[in-house]
Amino acid sequence: MSSDRPKVVIVGGGFGGLTAAKALARVAVDVIVLDRQNHHCFQPLLYQVATAALSPAEIAWPIRHMLRQQRNATVLMAEVTGLDLAGRLVQTAAGPISYDYLVIATGATHSYFGHDEWAQFAPGLKGIEDATRIRRRILLAFEHAELAHEEAERQRLLTFVIVGGGATGVEMAGAIAEVARQTLANDFRRIDPRSSRIILLEAGPRLLPTLTEDLSRYAERALTRMGVDVRTSTRVTGCDRRGVALDHDRIDAGAVIWAAGVVASPAAIWLDAERDHAGRVRVLPDLSIPEHPEIFVIGDAAAVQDAKGQAVPGVAPAAKQMGRYVGTLIAARLAGQSLPAFRYRNLGELATIGRRAAVVKFGTLSLTGFLGWLFWSFAHIYFLIGVKNRFIVAFTWLWDYVTFQRGARLITEVPPQGRQ
């Protein structure tokens, strides 16, 4: 790697970070991509890993492999611990790394609204480890119910609670209902998985609050037809190993899944920058931070507003647009040019509800039911990385649709703490 060329350090190998790196492929810079994992994960399909429809390898790819043909890019698997803004250094567990430009694309993690102790009882869904942990809990609940001798304990184990009525919560609820009502319906002898209770809790007045009210109502009706108990305006006040507490009630459950909120990475703390209520860094119109034009924050780590003054959603298309913009902006600055402020293009919002229904909002176009599901399926397959993965996922979905089967129903051991 040439030492006399500008060095662009990108922290995070998600949608935003990788897009920024690729946007610099033909620019005379040295690009270093840092990530504590060795893989990029297609987060929109994590719930399908969590519900045994897909295996982890079908939605995740090694970052090194994805950038192997980009000669100016180097990938380092290292965890960032802080920044030295004055010295322009990224502090990592493997030592400091200097930069001329810094792109922070560290994403977000689960928010338990001040109750981080709930995490051990109600895992969220942000990475492959989360998905396999949730899959294990769901499948073990059925196995333990088969062994249970008391009816009350059996009913508890066959109760699944999803906290949060956004896209992830809706998709998880529909997928678990399909697992219970169809996939596992004939696999057990002592229990009937079809008697499972799937309860979706939403603190707000309706599901999918970012979509229109008619699409929210459709999603609730579709879930109800699948046997999901949808409870809006219901707030969780406690969580333990046997279930959740509500304002005036309690639900004992075999598994609880958290889909209620996210909080940004520690980027704002590293930068000592102004942040919003979710911990996202408030950036300037060009996605840089005040007093440091060489530092950019993108994706879920950034608080960005669109042309209407609305917050840009934390979705993959937004992160990719920010990454592409920052990569292009760095190239323009090195050429002595400038770019107008970042402008977000809303490419639509989607959520699937089981195997034959979805809700899609694309500009003025709204789709529901089977047509919505087809649109959702093609959109996700299109954005998967690699032709091989597109064929695998498309075939898997087709096979599951015809046979009602899910081929990744493995219960794997969780390694003891401190071991890999």
Image: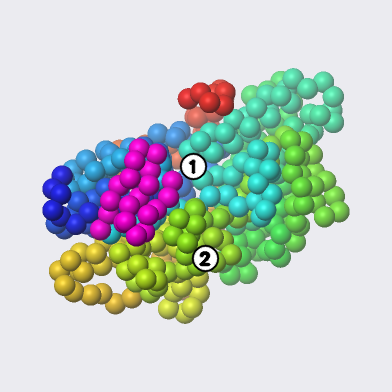
Q: Which residue is mark 2?
A: 275
Q: Secondary structure at mark 2?
A: loop
Which amino acid, by three-letter code, is at mark 1?
Gly
Magenta range is 81-100
Which amino acid, by three-letter code, is at mark 2?
Arg
Which quadrant would the N terminus be assigned to in this image?
Answer: top left
- Discs 2/1, front: 2
Q: Is residue 361 visible?
A: no
At horizontal 57% and vertical 49% (from top left) the residue drawn is 110
Q: Secondary structure at mark 1?
A: loop
Q: Which residue is mark 1?
A: 127
Q: State whether residue 30 is above or below residue 128.
A: below
The earlier-in-sequence mark between 2 and 1 is 1
Q: Is residue 234 left or right of residue 133?
A: right
| Residue 7 position within the rendered picture, expressed as x and y whole percent measured from the top left | 22, 54
| Residue 324 position within the rendered picture, expressed as x and y whole percent measured from the top left | 29, 61
At horizontal 57% and vertical 34% (from top left) the residue drawn is 133
Q: Is residue 112 magenta?
A: no
Q: State whether residue 148 is above or below residue 16.
A: above
